[in-house]
Image: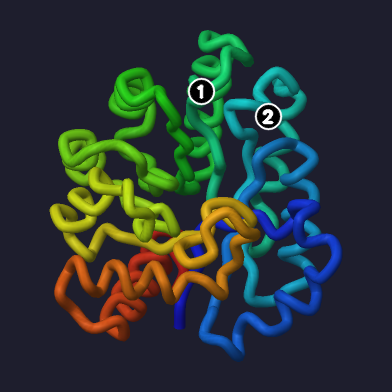
Amino acid sequence: MIFDTHAHYDDEAFDSDRDELVAGLMERGIGHVVNVGSSLASTRTTLELVEKYPFFYGAVGVHPSETEELDEDGIVWLREVSGRERIVAIGEIGLDYYWPEPDRELQKKWFIRQLELAGEVNLPVIIHSRDAAQDTLEIMKEHGRDLGGVIHCFSYGVELAREYLKMGYYLGIGGVLTFKNARKLKEVVQFMPMEQMVLETDCPYLAPVPYRGKRNSSLYLPYVVQAVSEIKGIMPEQVVAITEANARCLYRLS
């Protein structure tokens, strides 16, 4: 079954029909979902979803755009909740230079601190990097080389993909692969080994064609599977089986 390695079902976009939607996932081929925290508040709601839905796992962490809220008390709390049942990663963490705020040095500080936390609690990391290719790579080489994890929504070219793949990281591939202007990502998928690919939605964002611009959900991952299948020249069933096994390896599940 398909393993959605990165979702945000706690987002308000799902408030009107969350239970109904989630209840139908398994019967339509979605075996597991990792709901990912992006702030202290969304980490709390992620914990609630993991308790409510037995096929959900969770990740706890603070997105770079929310790092102004972080302090050492927040890190202490993240450490505490990281030990809860079915919490499988620290994330999403990283750098985002698309907007001028928060300050880049502040983002770097809390990115490094959360990488250190992952090492302390022995969990893999989910890395967010937007318009921050070089700084992210430098920090990962110094502080994240041996942690293991995934570069979420990978958006750079083959050369950067090669660096992360050599470090043993997985690359998260989602709906962007189906976009007409996704030439770089298609080149990355062609280049990379299937053994380091995982599927993700980032829902409610980044819905694949033909739903681009609409609310995304795990139900649309078959469109990503088909795109990978065509690029790699393998059957869709193989894409599903390989990426599910990879997801289990990434998140250290039996």
Mark seen at residue 237: none
Where is residue 55 drawn, in percent x and y?
63, 76
Residue 126 vs residue 226, the one in the foreground: 226
Q: Is residue 70 visible?
A: yes
| Residue at figure coordinates x 17%, y 68% from the top left | 232
Residue occupying image coordinates x 65% and y 51%: 83
Between residues 26 and 15, which one lies in front from this camera angle? Answer: 15
Q: Find residue 246 and report its horizontal and vertical position in percent.
A: 34, 66
In which quarter of the view is residue 214 placed? bottom right
Q: Position of residue 184 (x, y in %)?
A: 24, 43
Of discs 2 and 1, which sits in the foreground? 1
Q: Secondary structure at mark 2?
A: helix
**Secondary element at tag 1:** loop
Q: Which mark is residue 98?
A: 1
Numbered badge on residue 75 = 2
Which image quarter: residue 151?
top left
Q: Quadrant of the C terminus?
A: bottom left
